[in-house]
Amino acid sequence: MALPRLLTAVAACAVLAGTPALADEIQEINLQFRTGDLGGALDHANRYLAQHPGDARARFLKGLILADQGKTNDAIELFSGLTEDHPELPEPYNNLAVLYASQTRYEAARNALETAVRTHPNYATGHENLGDVYAKMAAIAYGKALALDSRNATVQTKLTLIQNMLGEQARRQAAAKPVPGASQPTPAR
């Protein structure tokens, strides 16, 4: 599935609105994150958020850092808080879905992605990831059907098609590098 690599792609630097000093500080945190200084980036983000606790971009970036550090539950908590404080932003829902999918919580991932595309019907990443989640859920359902009726050739064909699609997607994703220019959330004012 393409979902786990999306966390890194979404972290790419975007043109930040607001005062230049604040934007520069967030860009510094983002640079630390992208260069692999996760501890430094997290410390910097925490210091920044102590002074600017409502900054959605900094909170979002902190969630990416936590996820990259393997602190999935902390990242889920952070992104959940962002969805409560900024329900108009699709990116936190998308990243929640990525984290839920990594825990094989596909229903929760589906719900988060459906909310993301409901908030922004033109959010292509959300639609793509929703398709990935549906494909994984289909593979699970076909697998269960095949376990109940191992002679069902139609189900076997469908399962093979889905598995091939998911496998090819994983191979392409492993070869691809994150695409710079993905956006961070921009809260509505």
Image (spheres, grey):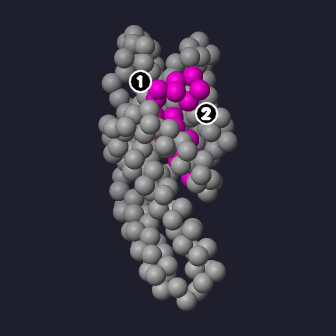
Q: Is residue 131 above or below residue 9?
A: below
Q: Is residue 108 above or below residue 14?
A: below
Identify the element where label 2 is drawn.
Answer: helix
Identify the element where label 1 is drawn.
Answer: loop
User: Percent from the top left, x then y, of residue 187?
Assistant: 44, 21
The tag earlier along the polypeptide, 2 or 1, is 2
Tell me the residue that label 2 is attached to. Answer: 80
Q: Residue at x 36, y 52 (%)?
A: 177
User: Percent from the top left, x then y, of residue 143?
Assistant: 57, 74
Alpha carbon separation for disc pair 2 and 1? 16 Å
**Does residue 106 belong to the magenta stretch?**
no
Q: Residue at x 60, y 47 (%)?
A: 108
Q: Is residue 31 above or below residue 3?
A: above
Q: Residue at x 54, y 42 (%)?
A: 112
Q: Report the predominant secondary structure element of the magenta stretch.
A: helix
Amino acid carrying label 2: it is: Ser
Label 1 Cα crowd, 10 Å radius (few <14 / some 14-19 / many 20+): some
Q: Which residues are magenta?
A: 83-102
Examine the rendering and report whether any part of residue 58 can be seen: no
Residue 186 numbered tag: 1
